[in-house]
Amino acid sequence: MTQKSDVANLIALTALVLDQRLQQLRLAAAARDRSRRQIAALDLPPTDHDLPLPIAGQVSLAYERWADLRRTELNALIARQTVEWMAARSAASLAFGRAEALRGLAARQAREKPRAP
C-alpha cells in the first residue's frame, strides 16, 4: 500500500471511531437529561384533591418523604451519569482530534508534489 492509501484507510477508521464516540456522548447526555427531568418533575406542585384537610396534609407529607428519598436517589444517579458524560465527551474530543490530524495530513499530502521513485 502507498502512504496515501494508508492515510485514507486511517481516515475512514477514525471517522468510524468518531461516530461511535459521538453516539456514546449523545446517549450519555440523553440519560442525564432524562434524570434531570425526573428530578424536576418531583418539584411540580401537587394537584388539588377533594380530600379533607387532615388527610390531604398526611398525603402531602407522605409524598414529600417519598420525593426526598427519590431526589437523593436521582442526585446520586445524575452524579454517576455526569461522570459518564464527561468521560464520553473526553473520548469524543480525542477521537475528533485524531480525525482532524489525519485530515490535515491528507490535505498536506494532496498539496505535495509526487516524489520520483
Image (cartoon, grey):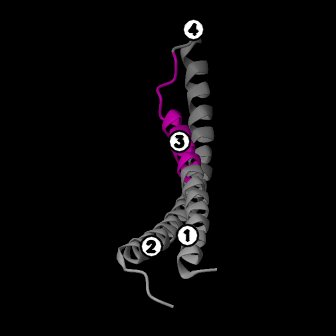
Q: Earlier in the sequence, mark 2 or mark 1?
A: 1
How far is the residue under mark 4 from the one under mark 2?
72 Å
Check residue 106 in the rendering and tell me which mark sits there, or answer none: 2
C-alpha gap between disc 4 and disc 1: 70 Å
* Residue 91: percent from left, percent from top: 54, 69
Q: Residue furthest left?
A: 111
Image x and y of residue 41, in percent: 52, 33
Question: Which of marks 3 and 4 precedes in the sequence?
Answer: 3
What's under tag 3, amino acid-wise? Ile
Q: Which residues are magenta?
A: 28-47
Among numbered discs 4 and 1, the one appearing first in the sequence: 1
Q: Residue at x 63, y 39 (%)?
A: 66
Q: Please give the label number shown on residue 50.
A: 4
Per the image, label 2 sits on a secondary structure element best described as helix
| Contact, mark 2 vs mark 1 (Cβ under 8 Å) | yes
Is 35 colored magenta in this rendering?
yes
Name the residue beneath numbered marker 3. 39
Q: Work out whether mark 4 precedes mark 2 in sequence or the reverse, and give the earlier one.
A: 4
- Marks 2 and 1, how far apart at CA: 7 Å
**Residue that numbered label 1 is attached to:** 8
